[in-house]
Amino acid sequence: MEAIVQTVTNDLRVALLLVGGVLLLVIVLWEVIQRRKAARADATHLRGPLGQARSAKVDDLASGDPLLDPVRREFLEPSLAENAPTDRLEPTLTLPEIHVRDRLSEPPLVDFDQAMTSEDRGNSIPVMQSVTPEPPATPVERAAPTVSLPKNTEPVIVALRVVAREGERLTGAALRQALQGEGFVHGEMEIFHRALADGRVLMSAASLTKPGSFDLTTMDSMRYLGINLFAVLPGPVSGRDAVDKLLSVGHTLAQRLRANLLDSRGQALTETRLAEMRREAASAGGD
């Protein structure tokens, strides 16, 4: 039994060796045939589709251009190779040099008034010599605030208060800047005044602490409880307008200083109180 198995095994080995040898021979023959076909195809490509040899001009063009490498180049017909474009030089534009120190000429100005009123429309438009614009005129200084009390009638004062919040004080520097920002100027009686263009005082601001004045030399380092914002009636504007302007300025100052806006008695400013102030001001201002 063992002899039979040994014989079969030897026969299988011989058969496998024969099959392997045949496959190897077939592969070698296949490679040889494919290489010969590739060589014939390359020869046909080099000769061209009609069997002509390529001209020397085409070879020179191909060898001079890296894009036409023999491995990847395509066939160029002789007629196209002979007419191959040569290198062209693009025209260049030379601009004049302008130095920093060179002064450019100023263009002339057209006198449009004379041009529009000219009777002869066929004439060319007249021009004027260029001129350098004159510097702006110096602004006219406003007149200094002047406090004037009515002579024939008893003056009436309408007032509001801008008071620091509970437990706080207004710093002198912030108060001065806020007043100056609203057009107030330090003047008579050492208090601040806001005047019209002609110098007539529209309203004034005094300290709530007696005597109510402000010393500009020490004001920035001081702390204040608040200010009394008031207008004297009759004044440069009507009574109602005076109250409205007081209210507007007082509201702005209170916002800037983070303070409270109260009436002249130090009470909350209600609609009822405002209506009462307007009636009193209208009566005193002759509205």
Image (spheres, rainbow, N blue to C red):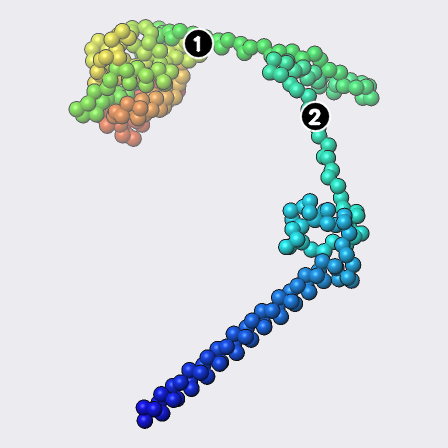
The label number, if any, that marks residue 94 in the structure image: 2
Q: Quadrant of the N terminus?
A: bottom left
- Helix, strand or loop status at disc 1: loop
Q: Amino acid at mark 1?
A: Arg
Depth check: 248 or 140 in front?
140
Q: Going 49% across and 10% down the picture, which residue do you hit?
A: 139
Q: Position of residue 40 (x, y in %)?
A: 69, 65
Which quadrant of the figure has residue 29?
Answer: bottom right
Judged left or right of residue 89, residue 231 is: left
- Helix, strand or loop status at disc 2: loop
Q: Position of residue 216 (x, y in %)?
A: 28, 8
First in sequence, mark 2 or 1: give its number. Answer: 2
Q: Going 71% across and 18% down the picture, which residue do you hit?
A: 110
Q: Going 21% across and 20% down the picture, which residue do you hit?
A: 169
Judged left or right of residue 127, residue 259 is: left
Depth check: 5 or 161 in front?
5
Residue at the outermost left position: 167
Pointer 2 with pointer 1, Cβ within 8 A: no
Labels in figure, total: 2
Tell which tag, 2 or 1, sits nearer the viewer: 2
Q: Is residue 203 visible?
A: no
Q: Position of residue 278 (x, y in %)?
A: 33, 24
Which quadrant of the figure has residue 97?
Answer: top right
Q: Is residue 195 visible?
A: yes
Depth check: 284 or 249 in front?
249
Q: Quadrant of the C terminus?
A: top left
Q: Find disc 1 in the rendering and name its residue.
A: 142
Residue at the outermost front position: 3
Q: Position of residue 248 (x, y in %)?
A: 35, 24
Q: Residues within 10 Å of mark 1 (few under 14, many from 20)?
A: few
